[in-house]
Amino acid sequence: MSMAYLKIIVYVPLANADAVRKAIGYAGGGKIGNYSFCSFSSRGVGRFLPETGAHPATGEIGKLEQVEEERIEFVCEPELRAKVVEAIKRAHPYEEPAIDIWPVEIEP
């Protein structure tokens, strides 16, 4: 019988990836059976245009920016969702981090 989890994906600048991964793990994300702090990462380039009213950690208002980022993905028990998302937001440098959350099932 499979177990219901959430798959959470977050994009973070390379320099902050370790801090975000640690925050996720300490909040309980990335736990699979007898393993904790489990995640997968891949690298890419994030692009954004800070608009009026934004307070960008990187870049300037009205100027297209691109940043080398790491995509961190991991599973999370549904009841830990709020705690893990809050931990990501505290550790993440961006004003509005991109966080995707999907329901998944894991086979024991």
Image (cartoon, rainbow, N blue to C red):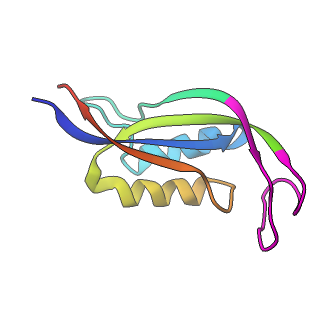
Please tell me whether residue 24 belongs to the stretch shown in magenta.
no
Q: Nearer the viewer, residue 47 or 13?
A: 47
Please tell me whether residue 53 belongs to the stretch shown in magenta.
yes
* Range of magenta residues: 44-65
Residue at 86 percent of width and 50 percent of height: 64
Residue 8 in percent (x, y) is at 43, 43
Residue 67 in percent (x, y) is at 78, 40
8 to 39, vertically: above or below? below
Residue 16 in percent (x, y) is at 68, 44
Horizontal side, residue 27 vs residue 54: left or right: left
Residue at 57 percent of width and 45 percent of height: 20
Quadrant where the image shows the C terminus: top left
Horizontal side, residue 73 vs residue 55: left or right: left
Q: Nearer the viewer, residue 64 or 21?
A: 64
The single residue placed furthest to the bottom in the displayed view is 53
Residue at 15 percent of width and 31 percent of height: 2
96 to 68, vertically: above or below? below
Q: Count the numbered circles shown.
A: 0
Residue 29 in percent (x, y) is at 38, 44
Horizontal side, residue 101 vs residue 50: left or right: left
Horizontal side, residue 20 vs residue 56: left or right: left
User: Which picture quadrant has residue 5?
Assistant: top left
The single residue placed furthest to the left in the displayed view is 1
Residue at 32 percent of width and 54 percent of height: 80
Dominant SS of magenta comes to loop
Quadrant where the image shows the N terminus: top left
User: Which picture quadrant has residue 31?
Assistant: top left
Q: Nearer the viewer, residue 69 or 35?
A: 69
